[in-house]
Image (cartoon, grey):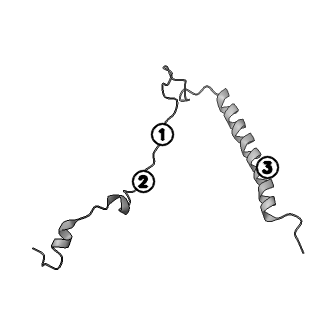
């Protein structure tokens, strides 16, 4: 027995519907919020921004092991000797 609608097509079709519902809800909230005169609402800047683009680097953690490797020639010389 083959299904009339596959799981993939059902999810694709429902995603469009849920997305449009979410967009309508967001736009309704935005228009309702615009009607209220909020003193803490965001305002236009006094000076126009000079930057047209930015680069945001999220660098969590430290550098990788490969990037921090450097050869230690004294390890070869002192191999097998007791520690001081």
Horizontal side, residue 25 vs residue 13: left or right? left
Q: Residue at x 15, y 73 (%)?
A: 78
Give the label on residue 55, or none.
Answer: 1
Marks 3, 2: nearer the viewer: 2
Question: How far apart, in angstroms, are the residues tagged by discs 1 and 2?
Answer: 16 Å
Of the image marks 1 and 3, the number of the one nearer the N terminus: 3
Q: Mark 1 vs mark 3: give the one in front.
A: 1
Residue at image position (9%, 73%) is: 84
Real-space Cα separation, disc 1 to disc 3, in angstroms:
34 Å
Question: What residue sits right under mark 3 in the picture?
Answer: 17
Q: Secondary structure at mark 3?
A: helix
The residue to which callout 2 is attached is 60
Determine the residue located farthest toward the top in the rendered image. 46
Q: Residues within 10 Å of mark 2 (few under 14, many from 20)?
A: few
Q: Secondary structure at mark 1?
A: loop
Marks 2 and 3: in contact by CB < 8 Å? no
What is the x, y in percent for residue 47? 48, 20
Q: Disc 1 or 2, which lies upstream in sequence? A: 1
Q: Dot 1: within a 10 Å radius of its alpha carbon, few (fewer than 14), some, or many (20 or more) residues?
A: few
**Image position, residue 17 (x, y; %):** 79, 49
Upstream in sequence: badge 3 or badge 2: 3
């Amino acid at each position: 027995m083959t299904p009339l609608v596959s799981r993939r097509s059902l999810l694709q079709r429902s995603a469009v519907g849920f997305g449009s519902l979410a967009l309508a809800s967001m736009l309704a909230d935005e228009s309702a919020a615009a009607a209220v005169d909020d003193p803490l609402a965001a305002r236009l800047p006094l000076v126009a921004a000079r930057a047209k683009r930015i680069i945001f680097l999220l660098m969590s953690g430290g550098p990788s092991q490969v990037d921090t490797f450097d050869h230690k020639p004294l390890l070869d010389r002192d191999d097998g000797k007791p520690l001081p």
